[in-house]
Amino acid sequence: MKFDSLHLPDTQRFACSEAVLRRIDWPPSVEWVSMGQIRTFGFDRRASKPPALAGPIVASAAVNRDGSSHLCLYPVRCDTYPESAAKEFAAAVLPRIVAWFDKQKARSATAVRGVEELVIEWANGHHREHTLRLL
């Protein structure tokens, strides 16, 4: 698996460190992890009903029709994303992302019609998950 990471200024952080990500036993279908190579999250124009967001997107995971998948972590300001949130992300959210990848991989090849995406938002002191299907 390929890791692409970007050095951030002191005022920004990621939801977790690259070291934490490297310790995860990722499914073989996850081809790469981006930490800041994609600076901001934006809904694809194919998203028919994007969810209303109340806070910054800290991560997104995607599975493509061909079975390949990737994880993106986005930079967030340190004053809006505390250390306790990063610890919660590493302890609780990352295992759910891995389980989501496993669940997507277990589906039949014809069940994935477009791109399936899991978006993690930090809002009101909690991580919220949004699932999107892009056709």
Image: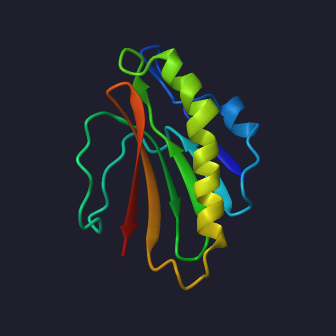
Question: For this rendering, which residue is in front, 124 or 73?
Answer: 124
Question: Could you tell whether 47 is left or right of 87 in the image?
Answer: left
Q: x%, y% of residue 28?
A: 74, 61
Residue 50 vertical position relative to residue 39 in the rendered view, above or below = below
Relative to 44, 116 lies left or right: right
Residue nearest the observer in this picture, 39 or 26: 26
Image location of residue 73, percent across then percent down: 50, 40
The reply, left or right, for residue 109 in relation to residue 54 is: right
Compared with residue 52, is residue 106 higher up or lower down, i.e. above or below? Answer: below
Whether residue 52 is visible here, answered yes or no, is: yes
Residue lying farthest to the bottom in this orientation: 110
From where the camera sits, is residue 68 visible? no
The quarter of the displayed image where residue 115 is located: bottom left
Residue drawn at x 36%, y 76% as measured from the top left: 135
Quick one: 48 or 32, which is closer to the camera?
48
Q: How many marks?
A: 0
Quadrant of the rendered structure where residue 49 is? bottom left
Q: Residue at x 44, y 31 (%)?
A: 75
Residue at 66 percent of width and 32 percent of height: 18
Q: Is residue 31 left or right of residue 45?
A: right
Give the image location of residue 112, x and y in percent: 51, 77
Q: Nearer the viewer, residue 111 or 78?
A: 111
